[in-house]
Image (cartoon, rainbow, N blue to C red):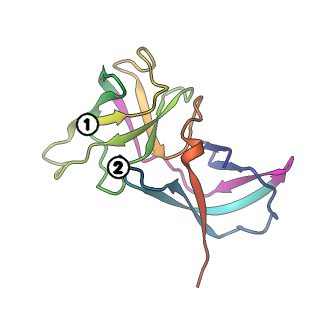
Amino acid sequence: MLDVDYLEKTVTLDKALPAKLLDGQFFEVGAHATKDHAAHWTTFEAVKLEPKDGKTILCWRKGADVYTGKVNSIQIGDDSATVTVEIAAPLIPGENSQLTLTDDKMTHSWKCDVETRADYIEEPLNGVIRLYDPGFKRGDLKAGERIMITPDGASGGSSSSIAAATILVLQPE
């Protein structure tokens, strides 16, 4: 996988595939578990494959964002950053790891994990997102800006998470 564009709902694959190979089939994009992060996979339905210049553009049907929100504050540590958002991302364990956070202009993206909660109705405010992408630096995000979280894969200017992403095709029985 060379590139993922969650707004345009496309994945660019590094090889040319026949145009009809995946039409109507389901596929998964994700990352295997690592020492520090749980595995995360998301399923999409392929609607079109377009072989182009020795590569393949795969288009899927539904949007992929799992959360959009407004940044309250950012604390930067030695090897990570903690972003607090206005409303917590309503994710459950198993959906909250190895995600990608993008800025509102879709010019930067960083790998992240989202803190889950036992009860989002009782505790909806001040959600916590931990960025662990080494490409994040002071000033990349500011309080008041909007963000979007998508499954693993680059959604903007940084492509650091592409190398860890994998695509699987789910074959019907």
Task: Report the magenta stretch's main SS.
Answer: strand
On the question of residue 109 being in view, the answer is yes
Q: Secondary structure at mark 2?
A: loop
The residue indicated by pointer 2 is 96
Instruction: Tell me the quarter of the image containing the C terminus.
Output: bottom right
Mark 1 = which residue? 127
The percent position of residue 78, horizontal first and vertical second, equals 33, 22
Q: Give the mark toward the camera: 1 or 2.
A: 2
Q: Which residues are magenta?
A: 51-70
The answer to whether 83 is drawn above or below residue 68 in the figure is above
Q: Earlier in the sequence, mark 1 or mark 2?
A: 2
Residue 40 or residue 145, whichever sits in front: 40
Residue 100's spot in the image, x, y percent? 47, 40
The amino acid type found where label 2 is placed reads: Asn
Give the total number of marks visible in the rendering: 2
The secondary structure type at the circle numbered 1 is strand
Name the residue nearer the viewer: 14 or 43: 14
| Residue visible at 63% across and 57% down in the picture | 60
Residue 147 horizontal/vertical position (percent): 42, 31
- Depicted 9 relative to depicted 18: above or below: above
Disc 2 crowd, CA 10 A, few/some/many (<14, 14-19, 20+)? many
User: Is there a contact, CB below 8 Å, between mark 1 and mark 2?
Assistant: no
Question: Which amino acid type is shown beneath numbered disc 1?
Answer: Gly
Q: Residue at x 85, y 50 (%)?
A: 54
Q: Is residue 76 left or right of 105 when viewed as pictured?
A: left
